[in-house]
Image: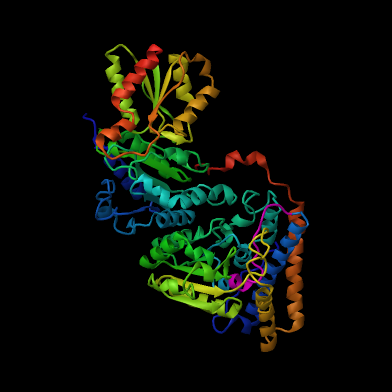
Amino acid sequence: MTSINPLLAPDTGSISQHEPSASAALESLLSIRYFEEAVDGLFARGLMHGTMHLSIGQEAVATGVCAALLKTDFITSTHRGHGHCIAKGADLTRMMAELLAKQTGYCRGRGGSMHIADVETGNLGANGIVAGGIPIAAGAALAQKMKGKDNVVVSFFGDGATNEGAFHEAMNLAAIWDLPVIFVCENNKYGMSGSTEFSMKIDQISERAGSYGFPGVTVDGNDVDAVFEATKTAVERAREGKGPTLIECMTYRHKGHSKSDKNLYRTKEEIEGWKAQDPIGRFEQKILEQGTLIQEQIDAIAEKARDSVRSAITEASEAPDSDPAELLSSVYREAK
Amino acid sequence: MTERILTYAEAIREAIGQAMETDENVFMLGEDIGIYGGAFGVSGDLYQRFGKDRILDTPISELGIVGAAVGAALVGMKPIVEIQFSDFTAQAMDQIVNQAAKIHFMLGGELSVPLVLRAPSGSGTGAAAQHSQSLEAWFAHVPGLKVVMPSSPYEAKGLLLAALDDPNPVIFLEHKLLYKTSGHVPEEQYRIPLGTSNLVRAGKDLTVVASGVMVSRSLEAADSLKDSGVEIEVIDIRSLSPFDMGPINESILKTGKVMLVQEAPKHGGFMAEVAAQISEGPALFSLTEPIRRLCGMDVPIPYAPQLEKSVVPQLGDIIANALEVHRGS
């Protein structure tokens, strides 16, 4: 197994102040980063097929949010979802196998990068349709409420999704039924090429929560501690039956939208400015300054994360290719 | 013993009620299904019997409703979604087509979406173009969905209970004109397997294939033609996905003539698929006349009664066309 352990959330204080949680968070951040750098490289060398959407630069959101969740809590994810999968505890080898079109991949090669789900860790699936997972998260939360369970559901989505009808319908249903769902908007400033200034007339997406009657907050999405704190508050509220919260995490994707992106819609200066705010660099600096971890410990965690990704590539590469023979029999689940 | 008679709406309600009594994970959600009792009266007293948590009234929010049902189904619930008119599924198409239909396959097979989406379909009520469509071919074209069209109260109960047993998304298209029709319905739970076509009337001269309200209309035509000495065999294709060609081929091998009757517009309709499958199958060379498709006109359903009737096959149209095919004219 090369998957990382679910993050350890401290009862009090911030993630960065405690050695176990800081270590786990750093491992999550770096695993996401190295995984995506690796697939970027495999793609560039023609060894990986299809398309993919990288979340490099946004790792603190997935990490900070999932740190506040239990294994029994659920998430729905997006087309830019590798980070969510990894932070919730997915197996890197099965993820890599999926991207390499192998039979042992999470989707047996049928879904690829945009469709990874992991029942074991409560990941109800990434989604190729912008905002597609948001009503599904509301429904999963409705089921928790109906069954009297105190699990919560997190729905990840981008800024672009908040202009879709599905976002608004799900927000409203979650509000009127007080559903235990946390809407996490990763505002990376662009829906493909369309900036938030172009696509909406409000300053912050969190304002949209107000029109549905529940709290909305905006946090620094490149700060693991800030994301964790906001999520923890929202999770407590949800578990107490008080309903949903919208958390807007301000962040940035260093890479283009997908493989076709030539970055014509944003400036080098803007990209460089955000790279200087890299969530991983900031987290490392913070834990060093606070004395939570020393450099040798950080290096060891980085090496461990690198090894995990390397062995995921090796193991996945050796797996059999996905099998066309089972396609027709896989469309419907067989009745019991 | 006298036959137990229920209306089509009552038969559906009975199936829902029995499923909810048997399985606590079954619940219903939709617009005005609570105290109102449903736009066509299907949910009726279920709200009083099962309460507001299991007969869940929703805002007017079709995409959100179906999405919520998909999410609930993914984590172990068994939702029955009522979409007030099948036309409104257009509002929810992403959740039906891109999510519900594909999740089991696309995500590798561990998850599935056991939901039943019920919707009143078809014309004949003067509700015009946005409340009268027959959209079954849309759904039948999407791998991952099952599509069912019950033609009588007996069929409605048995097919709905089977749909609720199914671990996949089932689109259950009820015909508006059938809600108040009655027929024999046993009280006990019974299931009609999905993926079966049903021979409803035997005859030696002509095979008529129909679905939904066209089944009863074809049966009426058969009664009337019997007096003229023409015996029609009527086959109800109650399940479009999965689809069963068996009884159709068997019938054509016997009659040598076939007419396909559909309310939906002809162009790209489901009967085009049936015609194609006949032509690919064992019965093609037993045909002594070309396949006849009697379908809705390729126009939106109009409002005025005389206009509405003229765009959808009526009893007289079925009789006239059946006679033409029978006589080879």
Percent position of residue A189, x then y: 57, 70
Which residue is drawn at the image coordinates 56% and 76% (left, top)?
A: A227
Q: Is residue A160 visible?
A: yes
Q: Which residues are magenta?
A: A48-63
Q: Total number of numbered labels? A: 0
Magenta region, main secondary structure: loop
Inspect the magenta stretch and tell me whether residue A101 lies in it. no
Q: Residue at x 68, y 76 (%)?
A: A269
Vertical arrangement, residue A330 with respect to residue A70, above or below: above
Name the residue furthest left.
Answer: B2
Q: Image height check: is B164 above or below B306?
A: below
* Residue A158 relative to residue B30: left or right: right
Residue A291 sits above or below residue B284 on the image: below
Q: Nearer the viewer, residue A216 or B155?
A: A216
Can residue A239 be seen here? The reply is no
Check the image and tell me how it is coloured: rainbow
- x, y (%) of residue A309? 73, 64
Q: Quadrant of residue A228?
A: bottom right
Q: Is residue A208 left or right of residue B312?
A: right
Q: As drawn, which residue projects farthest toward the bottom?
A: A290
